Amino acid sequence: MLHDAVVAAFAAHGSGSPYFTVIDGLALLRSFSERHPNHLIHRPALCIVVQGAKWTTFGERRLHYRTSQAMVVSVEMPGASQVVHGAPDAPYLSAVIELDQAILREVYESMEAPPTPASGEHAAAFVMELNEAILGCAARAVSLLGEPQAIPLLYPGVKRELCYRLLAGPHGGVFARMVVGAERNRRLVEAIHALRGNFDKQVRVDDLAALAGLSPTAFHRQFKAMTAMTPVQFQKQIRLMEARRLMLSREMSAETVAFEVGYASPSQFSREYARLFGAPPRRDIGKLLSA
């Protein structure tokens, strides 16, 4: 069982959470109580809840997921998550498996009857129910932590099977769109990546729309349908999360980091920082360091 594998992995290897395992792209999370919102940039991944419950917000969209469900993220984007069910005798447990686009594509192209890529405007994050086959793949991946010498030989096969189960399941069309998709969807994702990579610069929405092959109005609508944020909100959250990371890891001042992430005014940076994280930079960072 996945639950037993995760508990055994924490008992043998991981004292902290998140526990970034020796398997690239596999992390385990554990919480003994409800947590305050945790802001982070989500990478394309499958976040499987093994025990407990959690919510994640992306812009105006909030996703709730619990035991035997998973949140799927298909595009790198900022969000905030909070554990809502976790206790000393039954901690929140989850396994995060990053989606390997190359293997997903390889499996898709090898299928005798691959799913038709989903069409229309779809959110880049959604919640899905998990079946025994997917949970079994995740359990085998976590169990390999007890056999590190077997990881290079066996984990690639587990990843391939997981990709197959996702493509062959009820949401196969959505996963197919991640690797194939329509030209318009692919170019929209490229525009999102461009905004993500240039978060500290002035980026014109018209230029992003041109990269996506859309009119500014259509780009704005489809960007929000996918991320639940406007391009400006997306960029702002990326800037503020990067600023927080820099102040924690490099001990940079709020004034210095404001310019580093693209703000022209430290006072505007402090206001927007407090709005997102609930406290001004100095107080927020002090609280995090003391914790």
Image (cartoon, helix red, strand yellow):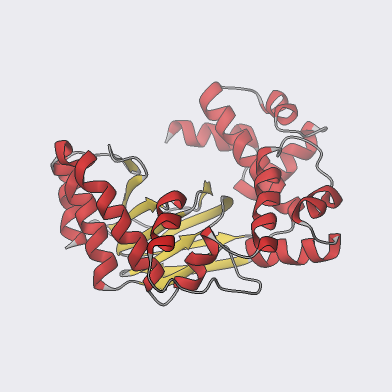
Percent across and percent down for residue 190 are 67, 50
* Residue 171 as seen in the image, left or right of residue 275: left
Is any part of residue 122 visible from this angle? yes
Is any part of residue 274 visible from this angle? no
Q: Quadrant of the N terminus?
A: bottom left
Examine the rendered structure and indicate whether residue 96 appears above or below residue 169: above
**Foreground residue among 35 and 219:** 219
* Outermost residue to the bottom: 170
Instruction: Please name the residue shown 50% across and 53% down the image.
Output: 37
Tell how many labels.
Answer: 0
Q: Quadrant of the C terminus?
A: top left
Examine the rendered structure and indicate whether residue 197 appears above or below residue 38: above
Percent across and percent down for residue 107 are 38, 59
Percent across and percent down for residue 235 are 71, 46
Instruction: Please name the residue shown 49% across and 53% down the image.
Output: 44
Quadrant for residue 51, please give it. Answer: bottom left
Examine the rendered structure and indicate whether residue 70 appears above or below residue 31: below
